[in-house]
Image (spheres, grey):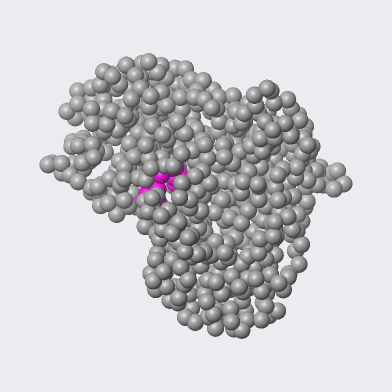
Amino acid sequence: MMSPPLVPAEPAAAGDGTPYSAIFDDVYHASHGALAQARHVFLAGNDLPGEYARWSDADSFVILETGFGLGLNFLVTWQAWRESKAKGRLHFLSVEKHPFRRDDLAALLASHAELAPLSAELLRQWPPLTPGFHRLHFDHGAVTLTLLLGDAQALLPQLVAGVDAVYLDGFAPAKNPELWSPALISSITRACKAGATLATWSVAGELRRALEQAGWQLERRAGFAPKREMLVGRLENAVTCPRSGIPGMQSKPAPTFHLPQLPHQRRAIVIGAGLAGTAISERLASRGWHIELFERQDAPAQEASGNPAGILLPHLAKDDALAARLSRACFLYALRRVKDLAGVRWSPCGVLQVARDAAHETLQRDTVRELELPPDFAAFLERDAATALIGRQVAHGGWWFPGGGWVSPGSVCATLLAAGGVQMHLHFGSEVASLRKYSGGWQALDADGELLASAPHVILANAHAASRLLPQALPLTPIRGQISCLPQDIAERIDPPFRHVLCRSGYVTPPQAGVVCVGASFDSGETDLGIRLADHAANMQRLDELLPGAAQGIDPARLGGRVGLRCAAPDRLPLIGNLPDTTAVAGSSPSLDTLPREAGLHALLGLSARGMVWAPLAAELLASQLSGEPWPVERELARAVDPARFHLRALRRGTAGL
C-alpha cells in the first residue's frame, strides 16, 4: 500500500511564544517549561531518573513515544541516560505524522541551550522527510532513535519491539482524537512487555477507559504546572510471541524470527567478508557479540565487493511499492552510516539517473510529482536543467539524488572490520566447506572435515556459494558483471570534466573516485571471471549514452577492468533472516509465521547489484532480530525479505523439494 506523502509541520507560536501547531490548533508543550514538563511527566512518570532508574541494569531499554514534535522528550531522555551512566543500549521509538523540516527544527531547538550538543547531533542526522522508519544512532550506538514518520494508525501496527516505557504525548485528545483512540492504544499495548509503564499529562475519561480496557493499571499523580493531575500506568501481563521472543507483540501476524539469545550465547560464525559479512559482523560486535568471521580469500572485499566504486542511489517506483520503500530506507540509512564511519572513501557528489527515452522521462517526472518527494531526497530535472548540471548535453531529463554518490566498498569493509575490534576473530584464506548441527548450535568444518569453529549461530553472507552449505539450494542466481576502468590519460580527455555519478543503462563515476569506472555488464547465470573485450566495448557504448562523444577514440583493448559475481534472488530482493527448515513438516496451511525454521541458521544474501545500498540496513535488521531489539523497518518490509518466502511459495505450489 502506497504511503501518503508527509505534510511537514510549519513553525508558529502562540501568543506567549510557545511553539504552536496550526494543523491541530494546539501548543507543542506546556508554556511553563518544556524541559521541566518532559522530566516531570515522562521521565519521573516512568520511574526513569535517579540512582535506581529502571534502565540502570538493562541490557536494552525501549521507550515508545507518540508525537515526536520538537524532539524535546527524546533529547531530555538522552541527556538523563548519559547522566545515569547506564551500561546498556537505549532505543527510543517515536511516531510523528507532521515532522519539521531540518532548518525549522534547528530554529525551534535553538532556545534550549542546555541541549545544544545533543540537538546538534540530532540535526546532523535529521533525515529527508520521507514516509516510513528512519533509524539514527548516537553515542557510538549506545542510543538509537527510530523515527516512524507518517500516520501512527498505519505505522504502529507495523512496529516490532518489546517496549519498556511509553510516553503518550500527542496533541490534546479533543484536538487529535486519532492519536488517543482505543485502536491505537491497543497497538501500543501489543508492543509492550509485561511490567511496562506509561505516563501522560492527559487524564481524559475516554483515554483512561481505553487504557484500562487494554489491561493497564492506572494511577493519578500530581501534574505539571497548571495541570492538577497526570496519569501513569503499568502493564502487568503481556504475551510473548513464540517466534520473536520479544515480550509483547500480541498482535497477529507474529514476527518471523527466533528467540533472542542470552548474553552467554551471543556468539556467531559469519561466512563471507564482503559487504554483507563485514556489515553483520560489525553490527553484532557493537552489541557485544563474539564473531568468528571466515573468508576463503586472503583479504576482505576480494569478490563482488572489490570494485573500486559502488553507487549510492535508491530505487523509485510510481506506486511506492515494497521494494521502493525498502530501497529508500536502505539508501538513507547507508548514507548515515558512511558519514559516521571514519576511513571510508566516498563522495556525496550527487547522482543523476538519466531517463532511457521520452516515455521513461514522463514516468520519472510523474513519479516525483505524485510521491511529492522532498527535494533534498530526489527531484526531477528537465533536460535543460540536467544539461546545465552536468555541463554537457544529455538526451533526456532525469532523477537527481543530491545526497547520493559513490563509495569504495573495500574501504567500507576494512573500516567495519576495524570497528569490530576484539569482538571479531578474522580467518582469511580459510574456507568453510560444510556445516554440522550439534546440541549447542553449529560447527563449521574445512574440506578435510576438521573443526574450524562452533557457535550457537551461523550467518551465511557468502553470496551464491551459500547454497553449497545447505541441504537444499537457495533460489540464488550468480550474475556476472564487468566494469571498465579508464586510464588517466583517457579520463582526462573527457571535457568538460563531470562532477557527479551518471546512470542510465549503465553508470559512470567522476574522476574524483580515483579512477573513472564505467559499467557494468549483467550476465545472469554466468560465473566466468575472465575479462572480455566485448564487454569493454559494451561499457564504452554505455559511456557514450551518458556522455555523448566521451567514448570516441577509446580503444577497448587499452582498458583495465574487473569482473565480479553478484548474487540475486528471483524477486531481486535480499534474503535477510532465519532460514527455513526445509525437511520439517510445515502443516496444512503454512505461513511465514508458522513455518519451521533452522534454529541458529541465518542468511544475509542476494544483495544483487545494490550491495552498498542494501547491506548496512540489512545487517542492522538481522542484528536487531538476533538480539531481540526493535526492528529498524516496518514488519511488512522485513517479511518481504524473509528468506523463507521462497520455500513457502514452493509448499503452496506443491513443488517443495523438487
Residue nearer the viewer, 620 or 401: 401
Q: Horizontal placement of 144 versus 619: left or right?
A: left
Residue nearer the viewer, 353 or 59: 353
* Residue located farthest toward the left when viewing the structure as drawn: 15
Residue range corresponding to the magenta coloring: 122-137
- Considering the image in quadrants, where does the C terminus appear? top right
Q: Quadrant of residue 597?
A: top right
Q: Residue at x 66, y 81 (%)?
A: 555
> Would residue 281 be seen by someone viewing this image from the given angle?
no
Residue nearer the viewer, 82 or 26: 26
Q: Horizontal placement of 95 versus 250: left or right?
A: left
Q: Position of residue 42 (x, y in %)?
A: 32, 31
Number of on-image labels: 0
> Would residue 158 be seen by someone viewing this image from the given angle?
yes
| Residue 364 drawn above or below residue 262 | below
Q: Residue at x 17, y 44 (%)?
A: 13
| Residue 86 drawn above or below residue 514 | above
| Residue 48 drawn above or below residue 571 | above
Q: Residue at x 30, y 47 (%)?
A: 8
Q: Position of residue 596 (x, y in %)?
A: 68, 28
Q: Position of residue 53 (x, y in %)?
A: 40, 29
Q: Does the magenta-highlighted stretch encompass residue 277?
A: no
Q: Position of residue 137 (x, y in %)?
A: 46, 47
